[in-house]
């Protein structure tokens, strides 16, 4: 039977890991893989998470299953972190998932079961795995314009495309820190989008993968919370990978805000049924540490302080790279980098130029010129800018 299989297409982002690792050149730069890195180039364990893990080690007495919904305290805490007080608790249901990717797949299965004819509208561009996770759940895929090749938001074109979406379709929105461009909707644009979704009876699917990396915890959830005043129901894929730096522990949540308590209860039962068929039970350790960090006042304060420092460092790197590129190119072409949010932006250079940077200068980025801002080094910005300018 297995002889009928053909090799799967390799993931372009993950393939960069091996290319970078095997490159022997000194001074190589990894701007590809999407993990936060500190000034030393390490991906640290956050202080509050480390302390929570110590307390868990001292207090846990069993590794028995928690159930299909996972850690209930975690589900409440992450739902509160994302939604605030924008929705009454009786309308909210959530299950813990293996990361934000797991949340997207669980929600995809749920939405397909609710409306097998529905399409999910993805921004163009979007995170590359959105298509696979939601398409494999059975949802049809459609696209709406979002950012053009120059890095400019195409909001009117986005609205015009979504006006053509049939009622009952799903619209995926990045809650903040759009991946791969770093270009977010303004408050006014969020409101206008909510009005359109309500008028067209479209269901928002908000991917909230970077809360706290843009402007702040509450600020980054403002668009999502505003939608709750405009639409009767929505779903959220929440990830703790970035803002708690628990990447390998796979910590996420699939959140449903239903029209009423009865529909919320039904959705909850279906979320657990989907979880049972996909992975049965979610991993516990990382979610337990996150739950403790959110519920303990001292740990929460320390986590928020460290998260603020991470966010401010990325903002500083954005400004620094934009300034270095302005000097190296004698143009304002890359000034948009300073205005972006979160970890990612696209430089807007060609595939040929991306490949030249890799081969000639050991600078690694994704083929579409997406860079991980958190992979930059303060002391290397001018040199990197000169290397980029050399291929233009």
Image (spheres, grey):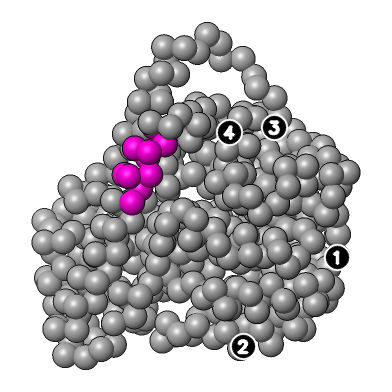
Q: Nearer the viewer, residue 141 or 154?
A: 154
Q: Measuring 25% from the left and 89% from the top, which residue is drawn there? A: 332
Q: Measuring 20% from the left and 70% from the top, which residue is drawn there? A: 320
Mark 3 or 1, closer to the camera: 3
The residue indicated by pointer 4 is 74
Mark 4 or 1, closer to the camera: 4
Q: Earlier in the sequence, mark 3 or mark 1?
A: 3
Image position of 270 (left or right of 222): right
Q: Measuring 35% from the left and 75% from the top, which residue is drawn there? A: 339
The residue indicated by pointer 3 is 69
Q: Residue 377 has which mark?
A: none
Give the quadrant of residue 73.
top right
Q: Earlier in the sequence, mark 4 or mark 3?
A: 3
Q: Earlier in the sequence, mark 2 or mark 3?
A: 3
The residue indicated by pointer 1 is 117
Residue 214 rendering spot, x and y as whole percentages:
41, 61
Q: Earlier in the sequence, mark 2 or mark 1?
A: 1
In which quadrant is the C terminus drawn?
bottom left
Marks 4 and 2, Cα distance to the nearest angstrom? Answer: 39 Å
Q: Earlier in the sequence, mark 4 or mark 2?
A: 4
Marks 2 and 3, Cα distance to the nearest angstrom? Answer: 39 Å
Give the quadrant of residue 144.
bottom right
Mark 2 or 1, closer to the camera: 2
Q: Residue furthest bottom?
A: 331
The answer to whether residue 368 shows anywhere in this view is yes
Q: Magenta segment, which residues?
A: 299-308
């Amino acid at each position: 039977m297995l002889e009928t299989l053909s090799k799967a297409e390799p993931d372009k982002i993950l393939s960069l890991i091996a290319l970078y690792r095997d490159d022997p050149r000194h001074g190589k730069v990894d701007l590809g893989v999407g993990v936060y890195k500190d000034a030393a180039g390490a991906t640290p364990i956050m202080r509050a998470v480390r302390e929570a893990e110590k307390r868990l080690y001292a207090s846990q007495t069993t590794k028995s299953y928690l159930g299909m919904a996972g850690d209930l305290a975690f589900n409440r805490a992450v739902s509160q972190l994302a939604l605030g007080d924008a929705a009454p608790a009786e309308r909210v249901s959530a299950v813990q998932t293996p990361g934000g990717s797991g949340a997207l797949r669980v929600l995809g299965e749920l939405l397909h079961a609710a409306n097998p004819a529905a399409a999910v509208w993805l921004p163009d561009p979007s995170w590359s795995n959105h298509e696979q996770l939601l398409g494999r759940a059975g949802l049809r895929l459609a696209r709406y314009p979002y950012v053009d090749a120059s890095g400019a938001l195409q909001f009117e074109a986005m609205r015009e495309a979504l006006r053509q979406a049939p009622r009952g379709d799903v619209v995926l929105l990045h809650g903040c820190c759009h991946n791969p461009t770093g270009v977010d909707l303004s408050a006014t644009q969020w409101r206008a989008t909510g009005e359109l979704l309500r008028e067209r009876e479209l269901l928002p699917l908000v991917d909230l993968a970077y809360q706290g990396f843009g402007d702040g915890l509450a600020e980054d959830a403002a668009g999502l919370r505003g939608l709750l005043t405009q639409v009767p129901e929505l779903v959220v894929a929440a990830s703790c990978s970035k803002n708690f730096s628990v990447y390998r522990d796979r910590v996420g949540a699939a959140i449903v805000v239903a029209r009423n308590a009865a529909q919320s209860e039904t959705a909850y039962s279906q979320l657990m049924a989907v979880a049972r068929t996909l992975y049965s039970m979610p991993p516990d350790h990382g979610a337990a540490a996150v739950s403790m960090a959110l519920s303990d006042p001292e740990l929460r304060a320390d986590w928020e302080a460290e998260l603020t420092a991470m966010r401010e460092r990325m903002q500083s790197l954005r400004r620094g790279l934009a300034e270095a590129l302005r000097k190296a190119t004698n143009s304002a072409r890359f000034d948009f980098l300073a205005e972006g949010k979160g970890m990612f932006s696209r430089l807007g250079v060609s595939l040929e130029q991306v490949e030249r940077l890799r081969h000639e200068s050991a600078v690694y980025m994704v083929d579409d010129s997406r860079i991980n801002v958190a992979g930059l080094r303060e002391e290397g910005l001018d040199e990197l800018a000169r290397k980029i300018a050399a291929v233009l």
